[in-house]
Amino acid sequence: ALADGFDEYFCPTAGGELRAVVIPCADDQKRYDLGPCCKIDNILPVLADAGRLANADWLYVADDDMYVHTPSATRLLGGIDHRQPYALNGDGNADGPKVAQWNKQINKCYSRVPQGFYYTIISRGLWELLVPSIRANEGLARVCNTTGGSYDTTAGLFFWRHGAGFLPTQDYTIRCDADFWVLCHRYGEKNPGCVPANSWRPNVFNHGVRTAKDFPIFHNLFGTDVPFQMPKHKLEVQSLMRKYDGKKDTCAQYLLQPEGAS
């Protein structure tokens, strides 16, 4: 059973049982620290305390409009040591770890920290380091509050504090509007520049699949095997040049509670 205040619901599906947990956080689009960032901070310790993460090597965190081809994702992660602190970085490519420049405070603090976490998969080696900080009120919600950003722009800084290695996955990702480019429509609006014969192939990670009916369509575009040639390079950690320097770090003001605060 989960902790008091967390309501859990079960739904059997063809692929297995789906579980949803209602978390005591606000659905606040103006205060990200009280909304999505609060939800991530709450669920990780609760699942850990309930033993739900005992067999979890990787955890997937993402927007609700992501379609992930799980057989391909599993293959991608198969050769990576989950005991190390790793996070997939959809903005990372051969040229560097960062594309999005959304959070001005983090840009000033450390410009190389990636900010495009509309999805990520984090390793056991990382989430085990995150939980104690969350319990100390120095979790993701703290970063969201101090920098004014949501989890997609702030997760990178939170992970970096804990020594995360960022694995670049832009080559495996459709970054936005996947429905528009793969299915040639979005909310019923046709894409005049997209014809089915020339539409994009879906990738491992697809951002922008916006309606429930589009998810099975995406799924049916894949065969039983990986349907495309995976990029030849292996996932290798990208260097961010410097490590977090604790209380002396210029980013500490966004990560740590002030002295004397509880």
Image: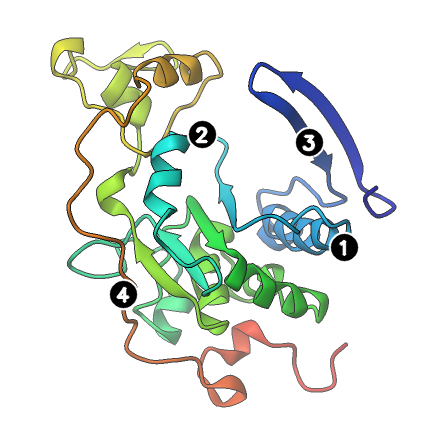
Would you say the residues marked 3 and 1 are in contact, meaning their CB atoms lie under 8 Å apart?
Answer: no
Question: Which residue, given by chain and number where applicable, does mark 3 sit on?
Answer: 20
Question: Which residue, given by chain and number where applicable, does mark 1 sit on?
Answer: 49
Residue 238 versus residue 110: which sits nearer the camera?
238
Residue 218 versus residue 260: which sits nearer the camera?
218
Q: Residue at x 65, y 81 (%)?
A: 258
Q: Tell me which corner region of the image, top left, top right, bottom left or bottom right, holds residue 187.
A: top left
Question: Which residue, given by chain and number where applicable, does mark 4 sit on?
Answer: 238
Q: Residue at x 65, y 77 (%)?
A: 257
Question: Which residue, given by chain and number where applicable, does mark 2 sit on?
Answer: 65
Q: Which of the two labelled residues, at mark 4 and mark 2, occupies the earlier sequence position?
A: 2
Would you say the residues marked 2 and 1 are in contact, meaning their CB atoms lie under 8 Å apart?
Answer: no
Viewed as shown, does residue 84 lie left or right of 176? Answer: right
> With respect to residue 234, does 250 lie above or below?
below
SS for dot 4: loop
Q: Residue at x 37, y 47 (%)?
A: 77
> With respect to residue 12, does 82 lie above or below?
below
Q: Tell me how far mark 4 sits from mark 3, CA to CA.
A: 34 Å
Amino acid type at mark 3:
Ala
Q: Tell me how far mark 4 sits from mark 1, CA to CA.
A: 32 Å
Would you say the residues marked 4 and 2 are in contact, meaning their CB atoms lie under 8 Å apart?
Answer: no
Q: Which residue of the protein is positioned furthest toward the right in this rendering?
A: 4
Amino acid type at mark 4:
Gln
Q: Which of the two labelled residues, at mark 3 and mark 1, occupies the earlier sequence position?
A: 3
Q: Tell me how far mark 2 sits from mark 1, CA to CA.
A: 29 Å
Amino acid type at mark 2:
Asp
Q: Which of the two labelled residues, at mark 2 and mark 1, occupies the earlier sequence position?
A: 1
Counting labels gives 4
Q: Tell me which corner region of the image, top left, top right, bottom left or bottom right, holds residue 96.
A: bottom left
> With respect to residue 215, does 249 lie above or below?
below
Residue 188 versus residue 11: which sits nearer the camera?
11
